[in-house]
Image (spheres, helix red, strand yellow):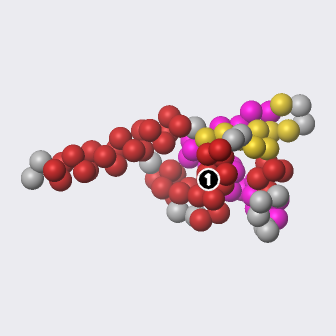
Amino acid sequence: MNALFKALNDPTRREILELLKDKDMTAGDIADQFSISKPSISHHLDLLRQAGLVVSVKEGQFIYYSINTTVMDEMLKWIMQFKSSQNNK
């Protein structure tokens, strides 16, 4: 869970997730949306992947990234438990 929150703590990584919300994208397509270096975007993508927030699939010479909704669902369930416990007081 720590890796998850660390990954979400960065605005660039949150913006990458926003981009991937609509469609799967290659690393190059993602990098084109930012004014930072491609190696920096690769680092952000790697942290998102390590946290389980994105998955990557290699197709030919391209790597496509997509959101891992399972991890998002688990995180929301974890957060919602706190709301439920507050409602019971």
- Answer with left or right where residue 17 lies relative to residue 69: right
> In this view of the protein, can residue 47 be seen by the observer?
no
In this view, the residue farthest toward the front is: 22
- The residue that mark 1 highlights is 18
Q: Give coordinates of residue 1: x percent, y percent.
A: 44, 48
> In this view of the protein, can residue 36 be seen by the observer?
yes
Using the image, determine if residue 36 lies above or below residue 3: below
Q: Give coordinates of residue 89: x percent, y percent.
A: 9, 53
Magenta includes 48?
yes
Rendered residue at 76%/38% (across/down): 64
- SS class, disc 1: helix
Rendered residue at 80%/39% (across/down): 63
In this view, the residue farthest toward the bottom is: 35
Amino acid type of the residue that numbered disc 1 sits on in the rendered structure: Glu
Q: Give coordinates of residue 38: x percent, y percent.
A: 82, 59
Given residues 85 and 46, the one toward you in this image is 85
In this view, the residue farthest toward the right is: 61
Rendered residue at 72%/56% (across/down): 43
Magenta includes 46?
yes
Using the image, determine if residue 21 lies above or below residue 7: above
In this view, the residue farthest toward the left is: 89
Give the residues drawn in magenta, as a range.
37-58
Rendered residue at 61%/53% (across/down): 18
Given residues 68 and 7, the one toward you in this image is 68
Q: Give coordinates of residue 61: x percent, y percent.
A: 90, 36
Give the quadrant of residue 52.
top right
